[in-house]
Image (spheres, rainbow, N blue to C red):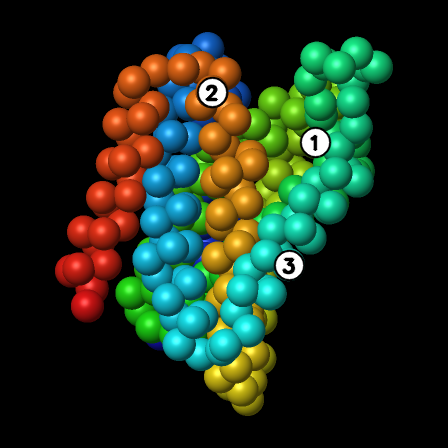
Amino acid sequence: MFLNLFLYSLIAGLSTVFGIYLVRHFESWVRKRIIFLVSFSIGVLLATAFFHLLPEAVELSGDWFYWALGAIILLYLIEHFIIIHSCKEKDCEVHTLGATSLLGIGFHSLIDGIIIGLGFKISFAVGLLSSLAVIFHETAEGVFVYSLLLYDQIARKKALFYSWLVALATPFGAIITFLILDQVPQSILGWLLAAAAGSFIYIGASDLIPATHREYSFLNIFLILLGIVFVLIIGQFLR
């Protein structure tokens, strides 16, 4: 089980770097098509949260809903405080700056690793689906992250170096989580799974769905549904 966790968490971490390399070498092509990966990621994230993480949390703890909602509020507050407006007009875009952006991105990657570690602690199926959800959205996020770093006038080589550091936070979080959960009571494990589900819901609904509204297409709707079906099918095969 530990070998599976290490392998999938490493792939999940490197998926961020993969997205960055796509931008470096195929920038115009990627920017036109990244929205399709985003749409598919939304379906995978939400389906994994509602069909796998939350049901497991409900079985383990009766207080799961506090932790799911708490994770959503916490991530909102974190994003709210690390994101600044590029100007004072209401319709301005928002972006993160410098070290603050790296801190936020690194923390996000660490959470992804924790989710993978929790998933494999429950079962191979939950761990695999959690890993896939992270992999798909981290690839898309890598494209956005690299663009933000360049926007913040960070040199391309330095941006790539920082991105590798951020990517390593995912396997680090997964391994540490897996190792320290042996003595954790089942109720606490349920709380953590509920928080993991809340983070997936927040990422899908807050960070990714708005991007599909800006580039409206019936294909986006189809890919979201395809992501949901993908999780359902994988879940059936892994029962």
- The answer to whether 66 appears left or right of 131 in the picture is right
Vertical relation: 64 (above or below) 143: below
Q: Earlier in the sequence, mark 3 or mark 2?
A: 3
Mark 3: amino acid: Gly
Distance CA(mark 3)–CA(mark 2): 26 Å
Q: Check disc 1 and report its element: helix, strand or loop.
A: helix
Contact? badges 1 and 3 (CB < 8 Å): no
Residue 165 shows in this picture: no
- The answer to whether 65 appears left or right of 33 in the picture is right
Please rate how many residues cluster around mark 1, counting C-alpha atoms within 10 Å: few if below 14, some from 14 to 19, many from 20.
few
Q: Residue at x 40, y 46 (%)?
A: 46
Q: Check disc 2 and report its element: helix, strand or loop.
A: helix
Q: Residue at label 1?
A: 158
Picture coordinates of residue 109 (x, y %)? 58, 50
Distance CA(mark 1)–CA(mark 3): 35 Å
Q: Check disc 3 and report its element: helix, strand or loop.
A: helix
Q: Residue furthest right?
A: 88
Q: Residue at x 29, y 65 (%)?
A: 125
Q: Quadrant of residue 38?
A: top left
Disc sitting over residue 213 in the figure: 2
Front residue of 236/131: it is 236
- The answer to whether 13 appears left or right of 50 in the picture is right
Q: Residue at label 3?
A: 70
Q: Residue at x 22, y 44 (%)?
A: 229
Q: Which-is-in-front pick, marks 1 and 2? A: 2
Picture coordinates of residue 187 (x, y %)? 52, 81
Contact? badges 3 and 2 (CB < 8 Å): no
Please rate how many residues cluster around mark 2, counting C-alpha atoms within 10 Å: few if below 14, some from 14 to 19, many from 20.
few
- The answer to whether 86 appears left or right of 9 in the picture is right
